[in-house]
Amino acid sequence: MPIFAGQNRAELRRLYLSAWRKAGEQHLLEPLEAQLVDVIRDHPEYVHYLEGGEQTLQADFPAASAEENPFLHMGLHLALRELVSTDRPHGVAAIHRELCTRYGDVHAAEHAMLGPLAETLWEAQSSGRPPDEQRYLRALERLTPLPHDR
């Protein structure tokens, strides 16, 4: 079962706020909290949301808005890191390594991979079907040739 299954928007956002607060107070973090804090540290531009308290829990980030939803963005990073760590779909870890080499930066590589992931998840949600892992993998393969294709 997914980590965040059954949680509403405010509960999910509370996880981010709580993890960030605990890290700032130098409390021991649970593994998920440590992952959240790692993603937050990669996005200092979002810290002001995490320090916004109750106001942040209620904030809307409409798709048509110029303002990106920081929680969606950081959640995509978490999802991508899980995909890479489990190599699901098979080959995603190799593409990640290749992009890390190409960009010379893990965060930049992740950003290249987030667009296709967001699109895949949106399509799955819109259609009511599971994400098409092979379609996602094909979209990633268009970003860079696989090492064995050289």
Image: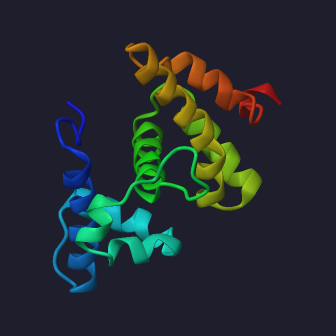
Instruction: Pick whichever, 76 or 48, lies toward us.
Output: 48
Q: Is residue 146 left or right of residue 122?
A: right
Is 56 above or below relative to 88?
below
Task: Return the residue found at the far right.
Answer: 150
Q: What x and y, as percent, mark residue 31? A: 23, 59
Q: Quadrant of residue 119?
A: top right
**Image quadrant in which the C terminus is located:** top right
Q: What x and y, as percent, mark residue 137? A: 60, 25
Is 23 above or below relative to 115?
below
Q: Quadrant of residue 95?
A: top right
Q: What x and y, as percent, mark residue 118? A: 53, 36
Q: Is residue 131 left or right of residue 63?
A: left
Q: What x and y, as percent, mark residue 90? A: 51, 25
Q: Quadrant of residue 85?
A: top left
**Image quadrant in which the N terminus is located:** top left
The residue that appears at 65% across and 57% down in the rendered structure is 108
Task: Return the residue found at the far bottom.
Answer: 25
The residue that appears at 39% across and 71% down in the rendered structure is 49
Is 78 above or below relative to 149?
below
Instruction: Pick whichever, 18 or 35, lies toward us.
Output: 18
